[in-house]
Image (cartoon, coloured by chain):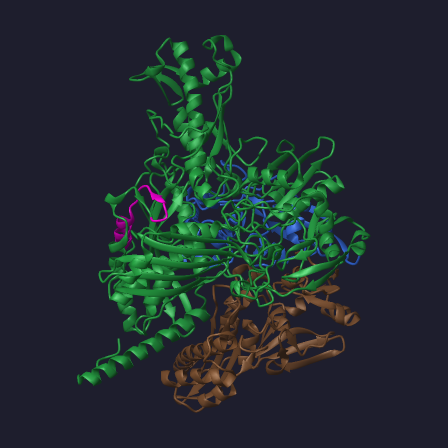
Amino acid sequence: MAGSRHRVTMRVNGSEHSVDVDSRELLTDVIRHRLGLTGTHVGCEHGACGACTVVLDGSLVRACLVFGVQADGADITTIEAFGNSASTLHPVQQAFWDEHGVQCGYCTPGMVLTTVKLLEENPDPSEEEIRAALSGNVCRCTGYVFIVEAVKAAAARLREGQDPRAEVAP
Amino acid sequence: MTETALTVTETAQPKLFGARVRRREDPRFLTGRGRFVDDIELPRMVHAAFVRSPFAHADVTAVRTEAATTTSGVHLVLTGADAAARARPIVCDSTIEGWQSTQYPAIAAERVLFSGQAVALVVADDRYLAEDAVELVDVEYSPRPVLSSVKKAIAPDAAPLHDGWGDNMFIKRHFVGGDVEGAFASAHGTLTLELTNHRHSGIPLETRGCIADWDPAEELLTLYTASQTPHLVRTGLADVLGLPESRIRVVAPDVGGGFGIKGHLFPEEIACCLASMAVGRPVKWIEDRVEHMLACVHAREHYHTIEVAYEADGTVTGLRALVHVDCGAYSVYPWTATMDTGMVLGILPGPYRIANYECRAYSVATNKCPLGPYRGVGRPAGCFSIERAMDEVAHALGMDPFEVRRRNLVRPDEFPYTSVTGLVYDSGSFLESLDLVIEDGGYAEMRRLQAEARAEGRLLGIGFACYTEQTAHTTNEFIKRGVPIIFGYDSAIVRMDPSGDVIVQVSSHNHGQGHETTFAQIVADELGVPMESVRICFGDTAQTPYGHGTFASRSAVLAGGACVRAASRVRDMLIRFAAEVMEANPDDLEVGDGKVFVKGSPSASTDIADLARWAYHRPEKLPAQMESTLEAVASYDADPGSGTFANAAHLCLVEVDPDTGGVTLLRYHVVEDCGEMINPLVVDGQVHGGVAQGIGGALMEEFVYDDEGQLLSTTFLDYLLPGTTDIPSIGVSHLCTPSPFTLRGIKGMGEGGSIAPGPALASAVADALSPLGHVFVNELPLTPERVKAFARAAREAGAAAAAGAAAGAAAAGTPRSEAP
Amino acid sequence: MKPPPFDYVKPGSLDECLDLLSTRPEESKILSGGQSLVPLMNLRLARPQVLIDVNGLAELTGERRLDGVLELGALERHAALATSPTVRAATPLLAEAAALIGYPAIRNRGTLGGSIAHADPAAELPCACVALGADVVVRSSAGQRTVAADDFFVGHFTTSLEPDEMVTAVRLPATKPGEGSAFEEFVRKTGDFAVAAAAVRLAVSGGRIHRARVALAGVAGRPVRAPLAEEALTGEVPSEELFSRVGAGIASEIGDGGGADGEGFRAGVAGVLVSRALAKAARRAIEEGADGR
């Protein structure tokens, strides 16, 4: 079978992982099925829906448009980097909970990551800026109304000094 | 035989009902620990991909699988012939006279009837290899003429698509009520209108997917599947596979959105079961987005011709409708291809007092993906027609469209109102919701903004629509609809464990609606225990009582009702036990705060946790003849079975750019009346979501097929979904007209938000264009091309009207007046 | 939707990259941002046998000002173009166009060189490059050449690149005092591909337009100039009436704008966008001139 194989080492949520991948294996499949981190979801595999959003070397990217082999040496953050229980939630997760910004949950990890990055760069975004930042994350359940409220609430909490440090999963 | 009435226990402290409680289920979704079907890995699992027909209509003359099967890593290629030998096709027949039946095979054997239909299944070590092998399967087709539209399918010379059919009609429905001829003959005026709702669908963010796991030693089939209706899938599988239901377990885990679309038995699920039986290993299929667009269920494609008869004061006295629904190639299970037509037939008159009505509604077979119910089903198209008709009556009479509604809406003193089609509008706030949306939606301010914009040469428009929605309908209604399985109830098992905690196993399937929270609220209230001690389980047919799943805006009423009924039986056990322990009269006891206590003397109490522990571990304390199991099962059919009607009014403000056809939605407000609400936060979320999908269908979502039946909208690059910059903040106000016969007066409402945005936006666009001239906006979605065409038509109409007015003025010898 | 198999190589230098490209030119594709290429591969519409990953090649990055020209490396990301102070000052049209591409996550990865080489007729950056009169720097293992943007884009997803060539940089004339530009696009929803787009650059002096460049995306197989419109603008005094007239003329210059369907619709929309872009560009040109910057 054509195609090359590569050993890649990537730092995911603070931990090093080495995997042997086929050149064509998408980063979404590597994260989900090789590393078992299933919080990153797949909605379209053509970069249009945002369900697969992760942070790669500091920027939000669509994991379905990156090959696993490209992530060699990269620093990746997925939803699993954040609080993993009701009592250890990041302020953004907490805000989504309080404001009912979750229905089926499928878009949620992408929304949370996009919100975290938005608020890192812009701690006091206007509604227009929030909507622009989330414009690439599709949700079919909420109509975005409570999601926008959640982002505003999260921004307020973070500005008030709630601890933004991500809880890194073991 | 289920009891007809649900006796609602008046608990001392129904404190959770109506509370805006945060959702119990959220932590797993927030932390990425939801368990969707693709997150499940089973030992020795292999992966499936389908070979799909590129032709919309063709004979399959050869399927050569050798190149695929001999490829390393490929375990199996299943053809249509293989499937036909091992499974019956899906058959879902209406009981209504004149129905023509289809056989929907798991894998097409001799003929394909829509582009994207599966013609073979490949099973390989992983999905990448499976897709490689799909390309190696050599299928020969002999194309046949394609019926790519209703028009082609109903043409007199159109060949029937299905063997044994006389034409291309699944069914032809006809209803006449009142004196339609008389109404039209004596009317002040009549209008004939044509309206089109183009094909689109629910498009959940998670595609379909399943893992079929046949255990040959136990002869047990387990199917994990992203489904809203696990028991119905099990029943359907039993039918087609010839297995008893007792040998099948369906597990629907977390599901990433359904909207009705995932409430079907799919051929792919059957094919995966057959594959697992053949290879003796779990077979996983995760649908990709292109497959989903091609071959999952489509929705909403309606063509209506509406005639309306009206009096000079705006009263609509007669209504005639000719409805064609493009149902695609096959009848879907478990709904049949009659869902949309039947529903439109019944609800087209809307919340209005229209006594004379005739409707011919036809389900047409074409070479397209099968059509099924999607949030609102036939109601959005029905609402589009009646609301646009009301607006046109208003225009014809020079009346305010709100006034025309007020003239025709069923009044408060008329409830319960039996419509001409026999639907019983049990209660509602049709007039009040209209008045309230004008106020809460800021109608006066919208007119002011519109005037300011017009002064600057910009076109703002205001539109509104209202509807009533049948919800939680059960036995009687589904019998009328002629479906083969009557979705007459839902069920729950409530079980208290030795610690006093409660597990509720319910037959609905929560996929975003918050049942884990709302059902816990009402069960906790019923048993007098804290909400934290109640856990809701669903989705696994091995662990839940038989019921129908979640669809049709029913779960809060039916599944919730079953939970309360079962909980009340456990409550009775606790009281009976406590009466024994406390030497009290059961009639003097009630539950609350985790205790059973004497009414009026809360300190005279026994802890429920103690009672639970004793029941299981100290059975000697139980009264004679009382069993140890604190558990009860119940099913609930909301009498009288014709459903309880919710209603709403929507108001919106748009800006139209006549040069580009762009429509910007500026404001949107909903007044929603769904009776009492278990959790207003959840209700608001459902309204927002429904409205957003309705807006998507009104502005941008469309499945476009070409003349050869090729689907052109196969990715999100062509099929557009509304995002954060397309949906404004949606305001929601609530009215409460309780249902007279459900649990605490709640009504269903999950679908409602999607019903009115179509007509609301269409009327807003028409209003925006009105300075140019009058145009009947009658086609959804309102793409820029269509809006630009409407703008041009408005200009032409305005010019013609001005010329007419000028000619008239000149003829009358009066000075020329300004064009409107 | 999984891509077909391919060999992946990651060169350590531009020379190594060009050598690799020259080995199997017909079967190789350059992987930069991947935002256009990978969807096509996942859909199995693009099937390169070899993917040459140029991410990380320092020679392909950077902004260099040389003598009235801004040279941008092919690997510059859309997000960087949109926010870079240098780009916004020297070639504001490019920054404005880049900010409109897709969604934030797309802009984080997508690159200038990738967008140009992909040559989607509706894409923003090719259109802006044509309006700016950019030169595309193209290299192979055999050497280097520059191609004017007007000549670079040949048709639908087709450029004048030879199979063994790649884009390494784009050179753009820096904006001068008295110049103004604007990019207007019409999308069916945010982040969508443009139905049509107009990129306009005006030079105004002595109260008159003395140079105009108008480029359109989405109306043909490649970005096209509108020479009749440019001629109609040259020498004229900027005014709403002029811009309206020129915009109205676009439809007939490029195709029938009367119809509401298909090409006619796009042409009509393009005309409207040109009028709006001209008004903005003129305003900016006059402000620039007034400030004397």
Of C97 and C267, which appears nearest the observer? C267
Spot the blue chain and give its letter: A
Q: Quadrant of the C terminus of chain B?
A: bottom left
How many marks can you see? 0
The front one of B365 and A132 is: B365
Query: For this view, does A134 lie left or right of residue B356?
Result: right
Give the magenta part as a residue range.
Answer: B420-440
On the image, the x and y values in percent for residue B744 come to: 35, 33
Q: Position of residue B80 (x, y in %)?
A: 71, 51
- Looking at the image, the residue that sits furthest to the left is B814
Residue C145, above or below A148: below
Return the residue nearer the eye: C185 or C20. Answer: C185
User: Chain B is which colour?
Assistant: green
Can residue B727 be seen by looking at this rendering? Answer: yes
Residue C240 lies in the magenta-colored region: no
> Considering only vertical position in the picture, is B811 above or below A6?
below
Left or right of B350: which side holds B172?
right
Kindly indicate the quadrant of the structure image that contains residue B185: bottom left
Q: From the viewer's side, name the closer residue of C2 and B493.
A: B493
Q: Which chain is brown?
A: C
Q: Is residue C90 left or right of residue B789?
A: right
Which residue is drawn at the image coordinates 45% and 18% (left, top)?
B609
Where residue C272 appears, as percent x and y from the top left, is: 43, 77
Hey, which residue is sitting farthest bottom in the picture? C235
Res C198 visible: no
Q: Verify whether residue B421 appears in magenta.
A: yes
Q: Position of residue B120 (x, y in %)?
A: 71, 53
Left or right of B424? Residue B47 is right
Q: Is residue B742 above or below residue B725?
A: above
